[in-house]
Image (spheres, rainbow, N blue to C red):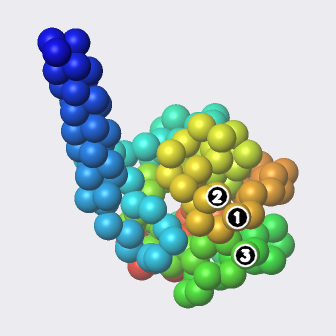
């Protein structure tokens, strides 16, 4: 009888723990359907070479270079306003850290293997973002283009 009680308590604690973890994840509302927002207080940098990005005022010259790189390497799968092969990108600079965005551009396969938000994007879109041989300089320019689109100053 005591053993049965202990087993019940064990499973109860396990269930409550799993539910509270799930509730925490569900608290983060998605700004765009199919695009998970990081949990509250979570500012993931993702997985990859970018550990720190210093943002200043918007650099329109860099944003133009980013637009050209985006059109060449990203536009086949991404739109800003609508779901396409990949998620819509409008507001991405408000949902993700600059480091996360650049790491996703530079390191998409490892990101979808190890980063929770990237894993969820893969689960929602069922398409692996492909490695496009983007340089860090190009990724930074694409980030600046995203910032320009999202209205950063």
Q: Residue beneath label 2, please? A: 122
Residue toward you, 92 or 135: 92
Query: Mark 2 packing: few (<14 Cα in 10 Å), some, or many (20+)?
Result: many
- Is residue 51 toward the left or the right of residue 26 in the image? right
Residue toward you, 47 or 102: 47
Q: Position of residue 28 (x, y in %)?
A: 31, 60
Tell me the CA gap for discs 1 and 2. Answer: 5 Å
Q: Is residue 36 above or below residue 49?
A: below
Residue under the image location 31 percent in, 58 percent down:
26
Is the residue under label 3 in contact with that under label 1 (CB below 8 Å)?
A: no
Secondary structure, mark 1, is: loop
Is the residue under label 2 in contact with that under label 1 (CB below 8 Å)?
A: yes
| Location of residue 63 by image quarter | bottom right
Query: Which residue is outermost to the bottom?
Result: 81
Q: Residue beneath label 3, please? A: 85
Tell me the CA gap for discs 1 and 3. Answer: 9 Å
| Location of residue 37 by image quarter | bottom left
- Is residue 75 toward the left or the right of residue 63 in the image? right
Residue under the image location 68 percent in, 54 percent down:
105
Q: Residue beneath label 1, please? A: 126
Asked if residue 60 shows in the view, the reply is no
Secondary structure, mark 2, is: helix
């Amino acid at each position: 009888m005591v053993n049965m009680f202990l087993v019940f308590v064990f499973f109860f604690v396990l269930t409550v723990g799993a539910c509270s973890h799930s509730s925490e994840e569900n608290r983060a509302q998605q700004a765009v359907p199919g695009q998970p927002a990081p949990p509250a207080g979570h500012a993931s940098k993702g997985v990859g070479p970018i550990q720190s990005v210093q943002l200043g005022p918007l650099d329109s010259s860099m944003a133009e270079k980013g637009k050209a790189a985006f059109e060449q390497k990203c536009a086949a799968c991404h739109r800003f306003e609508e779901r396409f092969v990949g998620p819509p990108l409008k507001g991405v600079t408000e949902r993700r850290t600059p480091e996360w965005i650049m790491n996703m551009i530079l390191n998409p396969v490892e990101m979808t293997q190890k980063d929770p938000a990237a894993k969820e994007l893969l689960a929602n879109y069922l398409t692996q973002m492909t490695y496009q041989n983007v340089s860090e300089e190009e990724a930074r320019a694409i980030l600046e283009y995203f910032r320009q689109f999202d209205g950063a100053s």
